[in-house]
Image (cartoon, coloured by chain):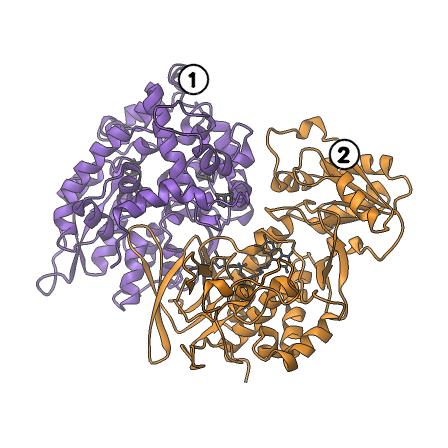
Amino acid sequence: MRTTIVIGAGLSGLMGALALAEAGLRPLLLAKGQGATHWTAGTIDVWGADERSPREAVQAIRASQSYHPYALIGVHAVEEAIARFRALTEASRYPYVGGLERNVPLPTAAGALRPAALMPVTMAAGDMRLGGDVLIAGFRELRDFYPPFIAANLAAQGIAARGMYLTLPPAFRRREYTTITFARMFDDPAFRSEIGRQLRAHRGNASRIGLPAVLGLRDPLGAVAHLQNESGAQVFEIPTLPPSVPGIRLFTLFQNAIEQAGGRLQIGSEVIRGEGQDRHLTTIWSEAAARQQAHRVERALLATGGIAGGGIRADHTGIVRETALDLPVRAPASRADWFAPRFLDPQGHAIYAAGVAADARLRPLGADGEIVYENVAVAGATLAGADTVRERSRSGVALATGWAAGRILAGLVS
Amino acid sequence: MTVIPEDQIEHSLEQSLDYCIKCNICTAACPVSAATDRFPGPKYVGPQAQRFRHERQPSPDESVDYCSGCRVCNEVCPTGVRIAELNARARARMAAERGIPLRNRLISRSGLIGRLGAGPQAPLANALLGFKPLRVIIERTLGIAREAPLPAFSRYTFRSWFRRRRAPQTTNGAPKRQVVYFHGCSANYYEPWIGKAVVAVLEHNGVEVLLPRQRCCGLPLLSNGDFAAARRAHEANVAFLAPYALRNIPIVGASTSCTLTLKEEAPELLGMHSDTVRAVARQTYDIFEFLRMLHERGELRTDFHPIERTLPYHPPCQLRAHRIGRPALDVLELVPGLRLVETHASCCGIAGTYGLKVEKYQISMNVGAPLFETVRRSGANLALCDSETCRWQISHGAGVAARHPIEILAEAYGLVT
Ligand SMILES: Cc1cc2nc3c(=O)[nH]c(=O)nc-3n(C[C@H](O)[C@H](O)[C@H](O)COP(=O)(O)OP(=O)(O)OC[C@H]3O[C@@H](n4cnc5c(N)ncnc54)[C@H](O)[C@@H]3O)c2cc1C
Ligand code: SF4
Ligand code: SF4
Ligand code: SF4
């Protein structure tokens, strides 16, 4: 019987489940659906609100915002999580590079520059400080990725960039295209050779070529190397709109690692309630056909995301709820206090920091600071106290608190 | 026990499309749209096209007929859109508008076909269906693909075996527990040994097996859009089973699609929400779900013989749609030496009767290709899968024998079936 339960399949739930599985606790991960992995860029953004390095920012938070998730777990825990994450991605032949020392400005599909602390090595050559001419290439068939537009916006920021459309070889034409259709094509060496030839022909002076982040699902590292050989330039991926190919790669490598270590994933099962006694969560129920499935709980990790992930729900009356276990939520008292008057207010909007308050062991806290459940840890966007949109810290918070929560529940943190 | 109120079900089906954020995660996961251009994918035919489906107006597109109903889309959707149900209802409306082809009427009546073929006449029926020229004629006239995997009829039905056998004597008076066994068409007409394994495992655990009358669960009718006939089938089954369900006697099945139909597909797609329909749904269990529950209560016998094997296990989509995890893995993990490796291929492609159709046969083989490859690469000469049509497809596509996990469990108990 699996009595170590993780709720949520986003980055925090996956990191937590990995920690618990590696501790031999055979976790069962329940999730309503796929997490933000499938929507997001696939970079790890630790801090990007200002010019400080992620390390400086995380260290400073400890002093200034004691209830911020980074403050709760400390810089050391963030570092540990990143080290484990990098080792995992390396072992899965999809290595991430970077760390807390500095942010790297990477181009978006709108040609803006976005700071990221860690990125898959397939994106690393997108560092816009590197200089030299850049070619941005894409396909007319792939919606929402317009090379001329991206290049024009980069050029406006002083980067020598040019955009062009590639021609889809007739044998690969289909009626509908998504990022996944393209990723499957890039898994095919014949397709890559043809695209590589076109890139070489149009490369001009460019030393680097940016392509949409669809360069294969099976072996992206191999795909990038192949394209570099054919084109004679460095190749990098630029994140697309969802579904996110880098995110799917990440999910898959986590799924394999968790199962290999004895864990189990059950996607498509929403947790709807929990029951406990004496500050101890004893049972949770997930939605299922005809009747709910009961799960006995020894320890549980709540990683259901924030408002976007479905873990926190706010309604038109101003009530803010935690959806899985109905834990107390720290949120503005009334709806009138949700937003600051200005959209881009430097202080951010109060509702964005709403969530479940936790102590240093990430246990959920009630309104008076009392522990609700001793055997529950909360991680990721469900946690209160961080305006991760403004801070550009969402995936960093998810990664670090997910790992920390898993280690705490496994009894590996004193 | 919480019951979803009736209007909530209708609401979640018809209005869940409002939750769609157009992320295309479902399209990325849909095995059919990956395999064919004829199917643009769940987002398009589901929440998107649904906006254009109105009473008294013709269906806006026909491609929804290519949805195999595997429900992979429902599983991954981050916002909980009930895409597969939207598609099934849309298909039924198309069927009502345009009529159902003879072929679909025929292959969806698995109970009738079973009665015709199973029994002493089975060798003849099997020889006929194994006769290539006849299959070519059937393909030309009816549209049933000549290569499609058809199971062989059994010389005897499960029910006739059950009636004739000598029921085990209970040692100390009344047995602890009773269950109704819902065998479905496949165990009755094609694979009676699976029914025997179910009975043997249950009785080994001190459970008495009851066998009231039953009809085909009606799933093939539902997936071919014949909702009127499906309703008749479900009404009949509810009439047969409700007397037991109302006495809290569990209804256990080893065909994941039959049990899913009793639990959810029939009530939700057909809008049947009476108290007896609900009672039957709530008492229905997949066999391993039931055995896992026994284990959780400390009532499952664990006198297993070790089986030193590593086997690929494919959880069929109809099992995943129960949303109960992997009960077969949970139980078989208890057998010393046995290691099952989940395949992670989304679908075998057959989807009940889908892959039998001449226009869909190749799609179904393409959908199943990654699974066949995984099974072949595993090097094992046996694959496990809880659903009959998927087992036939796996054997057909991967060239490897496929068995129900209950057969392995019976073997581990040392039960000869
Ligand atoms: C469109 C979009 C773009 C973004 N872009 C970026 C970016 O570029 N960089 C960045 O750093 N961050 C970005 N983020 C945010 C960030 O990636 C996520 O917020 C962060 O990863 C949160 O991870 P999580 O594990 O806490 O939650 P999530 O990834 O949201 O996962 C929540 C999980 O919980 C499940 N769940 C929810 N409720 C229940 C329940 N009751 N029972 C069971 N399961 C449940 C969900 O199905 C899901 O699996 C973006 C977010 C969105 C929505
Ligand atoms: S996965 Fe769900 S939300 Fe996303 S496009 Fe499909 S139906 Fe819409
Ligand atoms: S049910 Fe299966 S085939 Fe139909 S749309 Fe969903 S994923 Fe695709
Ligand atoms: S789902 Fe079950 S009852 Fe229905 S046709 Fe298949 S075997 Fe028969």
Question: Please, what is the three-letter code of the amino acid marked with disc 1?
Answer: Val
When asked about the image quadrant of residue A280, the answer is bottom left
| Residue A166, disc | 2
Q: Name the residue under label 1.
A: B136
Residue B210 against residue A382 in the figure, above or below: above
Q: Name the residue at 64% across, 47% down.
A: A217
Give percent across and percent down for residue A105: 77, 58
Q: Nearer the viewer, residue B216 or A323?
A: A323
Mark 1 within 8 Å of ligand 4, using the beta carbon:
no
User: x%, y% of residue A90?
Assistant: 69, 62
- Extreme residue toward the right, this view: A205
Do the numbered discs 2 and 1 sit on residues whose CB atoms are within 8 Å? no
Q: Residue furthest left?
A: B173
Ligand 4 quadrant assignment: top left
Q: Where, quadrant-wise, is the N terminus of chain B in this rendering?
A: bottom left
The chain assigned the colour orange in the figure is: A
Q: What element carries label 2?
A: strand
**Chain ID, mark 1:** B
